[in-house]
Structures are given as C-alpha cells and as structure tokens.
Amino acid sequence: MKRLILLLSLAAASGAAAAEVPTATNLAELGRQAGRQGKPLVVFFYQDECHYCETVRTQYLEPMTHNADYTGRIILRKIDTRGDRIMTDFSGEKLSQQRFAHRQKKTFTPTIAFYGPDGEQLVKPLVGLKGGRDYYGHYLDKDIRAAETALQELQ
C-alpha cells in the first residue's frame, strides 16, 4: 500500500502522463509469455461508461505501467466487457472481447482477474472498488502478491 501511495504521489508530482493499459489481443501468447517470465497475467475488465472503472484505470493501473516494481512482476492488460474488438482467448479461439468477458463471467465492472499461463484463475477476482479509494490499493497489492504465490505453487 505504501508503495502504491508513493507511486501515485510521484506520478502526480512529476506531471508525467500515464501510459495507457494495453488491450488484450492474444491471451494465448500472453499466457506463454507469462509462463516464460513466471508472472501472473492481470486482466482489467471494464466498460467505457463506468466511472469506477475510470478511477481504477487512472488512479491505480496506469501508474503501475510506469513502476518497475509492478512491470517486473505482472503482465497487465484490459478487456472491454462490451467491446466488439476481436481477440484470441487462452485456447487460441478468436472471439469478441464481450464474448470472452461473458464466458469468464466477468461482466460486473470494474473487475480485475488474475490468470496463470494456461488461463487458470490464480486467485479470486477483485470486483468493484473494494474498500473505496482509501483501501483499494491495499486490496490490489494483496491480490497481486497472492497471485504470484499461487503461480509459484503451480510451477
């Protein structure tokens, strides 16, 4: 939590533009990459008109894209639960983002899911803005650590 608060304050103080969280286009390839690197794949399920999603994206996830403490530990992607952009799932099937979200039962937003290399969920997803703005960073950090531990136990 302290690390995330420091990250957010440094980003705000520097005036650095936050990097966009990349969209998931090929989860099969990302899964292989995650397996090679020993990192969990963290997927942010969102909707454009969801103001809680905007908070999670701008205040927590985008700052992580600038921080080696996170980029060295996770692979982060986003999926629009209403999106029609075609992507590849973990098995190599091509489908829309919306269809993938429905198959994964990730239609409530914001939801952050933690996957292993083969698409297995490592820990329970982080749903909603759990704990509000005061504690969300704590829950996100805790779940990332839990996903790392679960992934290590699989190997």
Image: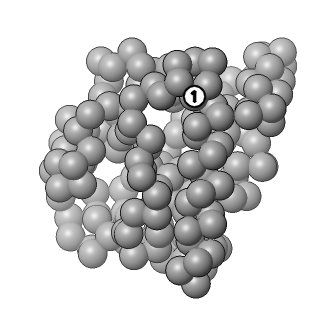
User: Which quarter of the rendered picture does the N terminus lie within?
Assistant: top right
> Residue 143, position in %: x, y?
57, 49
Judging by the rendered image, the residue that carries numbered circle 1 is: 136
The residue closer to the viewer here, 61 or 128, is 128
Q: In the image, is 70 to the left or to the right of 3?
A: left
> Residue 81, position in %: x, y?
25, 38
Q: In the image, is 32 to the left or to the right of 100?
A: right
Q: Residue furthest bottom?
A: 155
Residue drawn at point x = 27 percent, y = 74 percent: 92
Residue drawn at point x = 17 percent, y = 55 percent: 103
The residue closer to the viewer here, 139 or 52, is 139
Residue drawn at point x = 83 percent, y = 15 percent: 13
Q: In the image, is 116 to the left or to the right of 25?
A: right
The residue closer to the viewer here, 85 or 99, is 99
**Quarter of the image holding residue 72?**
bottom right
The kind of secondary structure element at disc 1 is helix
Q: According to the image, what is the colour scheme of the structure? A: one colour
> Residue 155, position in %: x, y?
58, 84
Residue 62 appears anywhere in the view: no
Across the whole image, how many numbered discs are drawn on residues?
A: 1
> Residue 73, position in %: x, y?
69, 58
**Quarter of the image holding residue 5?**
top right
Mark 1 neighbour class, 10 Å CA radius: few under 14, some 14 to 19, many 20 or more: some
Q: In the image, is 29 to the left or to the right of 143?
A: left
Residue drawn at point x = 52 percent, y = 39 percent: 21
- Look at label 1 and name its amino acid: Tyr
Above or below, 42 relative to 8:
below
